[in-house]
Amino acid sequence: MKLSFPCSQCFCSTSDDKEVYKNEKGGESPSNFRLFSYHDLKIASDGFSSKNKVGEGGFGSVYKGRLRDGTIVAIKVLSVELESMRGEREFISEIAALSDVHHENLVNLHGCCVEGAKRCLVYDYMENNSLSHRFLGGEQNRNSFSWSKRKNVSLGVAKALAYLHEEKNPYIVHRDIKASNVLLDHNFNPKVADFGLSRLFQDDATHISTRVAGTLGYLSPEYAISGRLTRKSDVYSFGVLLLEIMTGRPVVDFDMEHGEQFLVDKVWGMYNGERLMDVVDNVLLKEDDEGLIEEAVRFLKVGLLCVQETTKLRPRMSGVIKMLSEENSVDGVKIFQPGFVADLMDVKINQKKSTMSF
């Protein structure tokens, strides 16, 4: 199978098996991106042993490994079905997105393995796994997430997205921002990961039409219904994540009496009732800080601004950072009704009407 890279990016093997990145202007610049052999990665992970398995996603499993030089890494082994190309697109998207990005809040990609049908990606190992693993799953998990940690995670993810959206050219839309795709290092600093669904945009492109992909609860309604993808789709997903971090509640919950309940709808109802402080995670109330609740309410308002149904009303990520940092005030800012996708059938039915491209 021939492996190709989009957006004028290519990787050329040199005599010492290190990689050189060629940009669209033809210039070469050194890169730490490496080609690994499958044999070496198998040794590093002790034969992809189950005891070293640290995660699993829709397109493969992730293992902890130790390279020959002693570096501890995370090795994602993708499941690639040659007939359907399942997993191949995600593999190429991940490399295209991460091979030339440098930000403290983005996961670092060391390199890849391409041998026959085998596809592996090698990243920095994150000691504290993902935000969903460490934060969700009950009050005991959330007790370890103080206000300072939540604030740091929120700002870190916002800065990563602002970098991808506003500083890169081509700019990058992640397309699957959620708690499980935010990894945490040994100091609980966030690293946005899993770029398998990401898309690269030329600067003059306002949107692209593509198949709908992502996670129910985080999906922006306009993208879910039409397949029209923009940076504001990521802004929406970030807004949902911010509400999740502030409330400690699941994005989609199930109640025997009311059925599925969406966090966006719940927080919007509390905002209309002027009771936003009542939805702040009760774990935070244990912290003896009078200004904490006020600050958490401000973060909730920023989250609601990000999930407004009308896309042009949502802020850019650079604006989100200014509001979270109190550089810009949210007091007096009108917040309009959010949108959310309540049923996957809405996505499937309406997806047939949208333009599909891969």
Image (cartoon, rainbow, N blue to C red):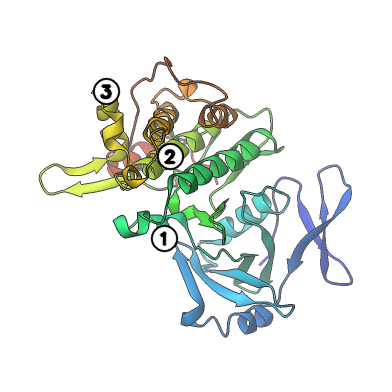
Residue 51 sits above or below residue 176 on the image: below
The x, y position of residue 310, in whole percent, is 42, 22
Cα separation, mark 3 vs mark 2, equals: 19 Å
Tag nearer the camera, 3 or 2:
3
If you read the primary sequence from the N terminus, does the residue marked by circle 3 or circle 2 appear first?
2
Q: Residues within 10 Å of mark 1 (few under 14, many from 20)?
A: some
Q: From the image, tell me which residue sits under label 2.
A: 242
Element under disc 1: helix
Mark identifier at residue 274 = 3
Residue 188 sits above or below residue 51 on the image: above
Q: Is residue 165 left or right of residue 19?
A: left
Residue 30 sits above or below residue 337 on the image: below
If you read the primary sequence from the N terminus, does the residue marked by circle 1 or circle 3 appear first?
1
Cα separation, mark 1 vs mark 3, equals: 32 Å
Element under disc 2: helix
Assign the N terminus to one quadrant of the image.
bottom right
Q: Residue flagged by tag 2: what amino acid is it?
A: Leu
Q: Name which residue lies at 87% across and 46% down.
A: 26
Q: From the image, tell me which residue sits under label 1.
A: 133
218 or 357, which is in the foreground? 218
Q: Is residue 54 visible?
A: yes
149 or 345, which is in the foreground? 149
281 or 231, which is in the foreground? 281
The x, y position of residue 317, in whole percent, is 56, 32
Q: Residue flagged by tag 1: what amino acid is it?
A: His
Q: Quadrant of residue 206?
A: top right
The x, y position of residue 338, in whole percent, is 35, 27
Mark identifier at residue 295 = none
